[in-house]
Image: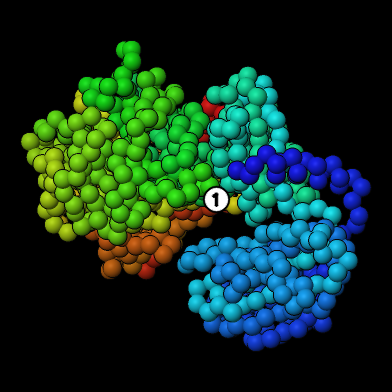
């Protein structure tokens, strides 16, 4: 954070603004050519660019329709662009800049007497980055009434060998400066306005010099797309400081931030047009990986990767929700927040039944979360690397304390991350499976969750590991260990507490386009013994104040098939609590035409259908605008561009569909195939159509369950 002198200066400038002289436009580059500006070389092209050039990442943040963009011909071209002389008449020159950060080689310079006296460059030097222009300024009062020139230089080839610039203005003030506001915490929430696509701003909530929260957000300069919120409950009664830097002088978003006892937009929350109604989604912001799935005293805890402050990925924090039945969820708010070691990436949670870590106080068992600190992913953690850490709760997960000895496992290699921790009873120690890099997993052990020792390494999967036991065909005398990664592909094998040994090659688990980074619940009681999985359902809609969701919980079983043991997935039985109207149909024959059925108007359905094929070349069903079909000759179940191998069982193909606002989850032959598909539901009352083409098929069974919204009594 900048020093207090800068804060005071910003305040003084804002006061002076009342009598400021009008700005003087130097150049906005809205004409088709450069006019009197002198061009040398080929990098700057024949005139200002109309945005993004061929083979360039999307260029954002410029004003109007055109800008200076020296990517003309790619990063191999070089050149310069120089303005005619002009007189300095204001103390500041403001302009937008982006592109390469190679010093004078990719720069915008102020020339006095032909020599550079001010130089600015873009932010990017390494592969990746963003083609985002941001405001900067020069303080030029020492050149008042003197003639100067502006020169743009591109003398760099290779990665980020170009410069972008736009809208040069003389002014009595910087166009961007830091701002602060005092916040006396008297209400529950701080509501913040978001505009998708607006320039991102760093915002901090401070108590004295201590950073309590830091995040980056697309702060709405005027009318927002939606509002997000920061829970002020932990700071009740305190006087805090809200701070931001690089805020434009005409941006009204910072002053629009408000305290309230309600969340802006809460009157329509969970009733939005594209809100999933029985799949979990966060109240506001982005979510991805499920984290820390753990069961304790009648509650299923779902933690998840959360950006509380925007529609896109960022500010990774652990969100938190609980459920008593895996269907109705109560969002408790964010549990683990970024700090000086990094943002909070994925991980897992356990119940420390034997108090091995020594954290327990009182009667409640301690919940311990293991997570990755993603160093160098915010301003607060610059220079840090990826490490592993723990936090604990002694009040059933309501509040969390980070272990003061963090990190418990230092940096090993690259972006090592996503610790999955389990208790291995035969060895009487904790086991951590950690993604290292490429497709390597490391296995570590500990007796106290604080000190870890690497035991082995396995060539396997990419990120988000999971390790658990399942009985084969329900026989507890024949237990197998399952190891999988983010895609869901899995090994079946053996594990001795230190080393995992696969029985064969990796096997596919999901066949859809709406599944990633799944995790299973730990600590589900033995008398139930279910292995329940939740995956990130990568589906969203740009018009919503939330983005992405969780797939519906499924129970995993391991069953013998003609190809060997395979994982099966089936929706948890608790979905039946949402059944509102059930229609069952007696068997009937399908000729080469379709049959349509009414199935309610809310578009929330659990459909089960069994086909017996005679000679049809294709048969299936269409519901709410999506078609699922079986192709006997190919032996494939198909939906959109996805296909799964599937053989009939006793001449029958069974399908089950869970239909929600943003997805359709498909299960076939009692869970042998799992195909979750993203699908935006535009027509909730489109009805159900079953069909057979090129011959006949028989509907041996059809049941349509209309579902209530899981949020009807939990807004």
Q: Nearer the viewer, residue 226 or 313?
A: 313
State the residue at coordinates (23%, 29%).
448
Q: Which residue is mark 1?
A: 312
Q: How far across and down, in percent of the image, does residue 369 sit?
A: 35, 33
Give residue 583's position: percent from left, percent from top.
43, 38
Callout 1 secondary element: loop
Q: Is residue 579 visible?
A: no
Quadrant location of the N terminus in the rendered image = top right
Asked whether residue 145 appears in the rendered view, the answer is yes
Q: Residues within 10 Å of mark 1 (few under 14, many from 20)?
A: many
Q: Residue furthest left?
A: 477
Instruction: Name the residue at 41% across, 64% down.
Output: 641
- Given residues 486 and 684, the one toward you in this image is 486
Colour scheme in the image? rainbow
Image spot of residue 611 (x, y percent): 31, 53
Examine the rendered structure and indicate whether residue 293 appears above or below residue 665. above
């Amino acid at each position: 954070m900048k020093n207090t002198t800068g804060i005071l200066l910003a305040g003084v400038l804002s006061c002076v603004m009342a009598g400021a002289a009008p700005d003087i436009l130097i150049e906005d580059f809205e004409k088709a050519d450069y006019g009197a500006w002198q061009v040398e070389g080929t990098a700057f092209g024949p005139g200002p660019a109309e945005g993004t050039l061929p083979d360039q990442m999307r260029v954002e943040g410029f004003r109007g329709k055109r800008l200076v963009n020296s990517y003309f011909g790619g990063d191999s071209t070089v050149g310069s662009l120089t303005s005619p002389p002009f007189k300095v008449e204001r103390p500041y020159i403001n302009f937008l800049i982006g592109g390469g950060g190679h010093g004078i080689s990719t720069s915008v310079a102020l020339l006095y007497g032909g020599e550079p006296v001010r130089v600015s460059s873009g932010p990017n030097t390494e592969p990746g980055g963003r083609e985002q222009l941001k405001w900067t300024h020069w303080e030029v009062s020492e050149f008042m009434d003197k003639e100067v020139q502006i020169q743009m230089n591109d003398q760099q080839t290779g990665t980020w060998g170009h410069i972008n610039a736009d809208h040069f203005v003389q002014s009595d003030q910087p166009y961007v400066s830091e701002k602060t506001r005092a916040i006396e915490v008297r209400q529950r929430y701080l509501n913040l306005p978001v505009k998708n696509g607006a320039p991102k701003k760093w915002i901090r909530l401070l108590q004295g010099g201590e950073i309590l929260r830091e995040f980056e957000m697309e702060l709405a300069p005027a009318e927002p797309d939606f509002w997000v919120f920061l829970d002020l409950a932990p700071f009740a009664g305190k006087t805090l400081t809200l701070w931001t830097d690089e805020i434009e002088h005409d941006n009204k978003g910072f002053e629009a931030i408000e305290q309230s006892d309600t969340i802006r937009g809460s009157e329509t929350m969970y009733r939005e047009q594209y809100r999933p109604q029985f799949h979990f989604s966060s109240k506001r912001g982005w979510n991805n990986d499920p984290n820390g799935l753990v069961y304790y005293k009648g509650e299923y805890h779902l933690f998840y990767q959360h950006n509380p402050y925007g529609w896109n990925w960022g500010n990774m924090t652990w969100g938190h929700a609980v459920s008593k039945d895996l269907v109705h969820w109560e969002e408790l708010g964010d549990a683990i927040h970024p700090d000086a070691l990094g943002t909070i990436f994925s991980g897992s949670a356990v119940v420390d039944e034997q108090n091995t870590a020594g954290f327990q106080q009182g009667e409640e068992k301690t919940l311990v979360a293991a997570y990755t600190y993603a160093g160098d992913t915010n301003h607060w953690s610059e220079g840090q690397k990826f490490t592993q850490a723990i936090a604990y709760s002694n009040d059933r997960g309501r509040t969390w304390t980070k272990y003061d000895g963090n990190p418990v496992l230092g940096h090993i290699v690259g972006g090592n991350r996503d610790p999955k921790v389990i208790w291995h009873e035969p060895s009487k120690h904790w086991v951590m499976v950690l993604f290292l890099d490429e497709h390597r997993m490391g296995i570590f052990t500990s007796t106290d969750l604080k000190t870890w020792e690497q035991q082995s390494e396995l060539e396997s999967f990419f990120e988000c590991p999971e390790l658990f036991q399942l009985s084969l065909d329900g026989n507890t005398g024949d237990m197998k260990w399952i190891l999988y990664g983010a895609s869901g592909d899995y090994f079946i094998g053996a594990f001795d507490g230190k080393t995992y040994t696969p029985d064969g090659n990796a096997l596919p688990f999901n066949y859809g386009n709406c599944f990633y980074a799944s995790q299973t619940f730990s600590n589900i009681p033995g008398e139930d013994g279910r292995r329940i999985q939740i995956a990130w359902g990568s589906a969203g809609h740009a018009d919503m104040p939330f983005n992405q969701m969780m797939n519906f919980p499924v129970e995993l079983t391991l069953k013998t098939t003609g190809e060997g043991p395979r994982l099966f997935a089936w929706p948890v039985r608790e979905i039946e609590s949402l059944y509102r109207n059930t229609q069952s149909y007696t068997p009937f024959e399908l000729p080469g035409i379709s049959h349509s059925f009414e199935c309610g108007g809310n578009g929330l359905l659990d459909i089960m259908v069994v086909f017996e094929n005679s000679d049809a070349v294709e048969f299936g069903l269409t519901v709410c605008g999506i078609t699922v079909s079986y192709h006997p000759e190919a032996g494939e179940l198909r939906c959109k561009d996805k296909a799964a191998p599937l053989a009939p069982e006793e001449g029958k193909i069974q399908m089950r569909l869970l239909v929600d606002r943003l997805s359709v989850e498909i299960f076939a032959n009692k869970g042998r195939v799992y195909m979750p598909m993203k699908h935006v539901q535009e027509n909730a009352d489109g009805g159900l159509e079953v069909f057979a083409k090129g011959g006949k098929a028989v509907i041996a069974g059809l049941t349509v369950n209309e579902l209530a919204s899981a949020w009807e009594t939990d807004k």
